[in-house]
Image: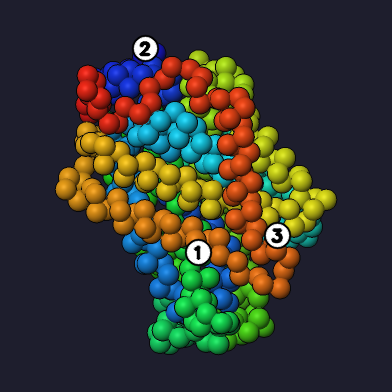
Amino acid sequence: MDVQPGQDVAVDDDVRYLERLGYRQQLSRVMGIWPNFALGFTYLSPVVGIYTLFAYALATGGGASFWAVPIVVAGQLMVVLVFGEVVSQFPIAGGIYQWARRLNSRGYGWFTGWMYTWALLVTVAAVSYGAGPYVADLFGANASKWFVIGTAIVLIAIASTINLFGARLLAKAALIGLVAEIIGAVVIGLYLLIFEHKQAWSVLVHHQGAVTGSGGYLGAFLAAALMAIWIFYGFEACGDVAEEVKDPSRRIPRAMLMTLGVGAAVSALLVLALTLSVPSITAVTSGADADPVNTVFAASFGNVAHKFALLVIVLAFISCTLAIQAAAARLLFSQGRDGVLPGSSLLSRVSPRFHMSPWAVAVAFVVPAAIILATYSRPDALTKIISFATVGIYIGFQLVVLAALLARTRGWKPAGAFSLGAWGLPVNIIALAYGVGAIINLCWPRTPGAAWYDNYIVIVSALAVAAVGVIYMILLRPQEKGDSPAGDAVPATSTAAPASP
């Protein structure tokens, strides 16, 4: 085993438990619960998600779209509880890939990892690309195509540098990002709510003329709910770095619950504050005000305060990019260690100085940067690619939830420090029902006037990535590489699943 200088007895127990799960300690086990929570929270990033998507939600569903937040949070809570049971028993780097593999089989785990890997890499590109206009506004620059592309690549390069230096620097950066998130969401939200409150509370139960279409307001509300669906994930990143967390069986489930709970409270505050501070919601739903966030900022803050708010938002974009890339790099390392990806010998090679795989970080830089560069000749390319990102992550989630449900029917009894007991089965069923509903909502065609491939772009992109993965599995059989454990959550006649540490 690779013992770190000054390693304590508790960490020794974590190392021994990891060895019982089939792996030796290579990454630095230095994270406590607060850095772990900060990583998940900055990945979820209320600031990035809401400032980017608020205009869409308000224009689509009016003030009543606020209620999508608690509904989605309630559904995701069920998913978090299922994940908590799994990660508590299997605290292994790579999270979702490893959970699916241990709950079901090598092939099932490989396919889950395939979908989730591409979703994460695309999300890195999407988040960093979204920072461009805010950076341009901060520095008074023109948000040209090259400026936005260049800004995105610089952000990914900054994140890569931090991730390359391992868990210690990542933990510090995540905590700084957490502070930026709190300022950008809580401080600004409270200021707007107290001093810039322009709308009556009754706007929260009206749609203010939002386009309802043939589906009535329910259709508009479900479309507006995509903002919340797009925001409330990231808690799984707490488990992606499991081999760098002390006492992960107990701390990671708590960090996941904290990520969702605090993220829900902060997001509700910010959405509420922005909704009540918009001068005219009808102008937003009619299309007259296409950028209500900028309208609120211009009306509420002076130039200095506006620049400070932009700085906080940019820091939030950097920390969000960092957290997502950290999850992607650990996922690549974990799959490389199992020998199931091309270049596995490089992806699994850990720097003895930084206790991180530089090749995994390099892939998590090169692929998103290439995706961003591809948008120069095709301005609509990123939008089409991004459409896969969220549904790909939700598919990864639900593959784990389904695997957990199937494992329960075959005798799996969660053996980690965190367990739902008799509530496990009903929570698992509700989590699966919610997730399937969210995926259907994400895939639902909402642009009937567009070409079929644009109207069904989410379905088409998800099926395309899945099809390539299936063909790859059939032709090259990567799932059969290596000898790492799989399917051991369900005790065999002669072998029981590993007990918790």
The answer to which of 175 and 201 lies nearer the viewer is 201
Circle 1: element type: helix
Q: Are marks 2 and 3 in contact (CB under 8 Å)?
A: no
| Residue at horizontal 43 percent and vertical 61 percent from the top | 437
Q: Earlier in the sequence, mark 2 or mark 1?
A: 2
Badges 1 and 3: C-beta atoms under 8 Å apart? no
Residue type marked 1:
Asn
Disc 3 target residue: 453
Residue furthest out toward the right: 377
- The residue that label 1 is drawn on is 441
Residue 242 drawn at (x, y percent): 38, 32
The residue lying at 73 percent from left, 53 percent from top is: 381
Can residue 318 be seen here? The reply is no
Which callout, 2 or 1, points to the residue nearer the camera?
Answer: 1
Q: Is residue 348 above or below residue 437?
A: above
* Residue at image location 30% in from the left, 19% down from the top: 20
Query: Which colour scheme appears in the figure?
Result: rainbow
Disc number for residue 1: 2
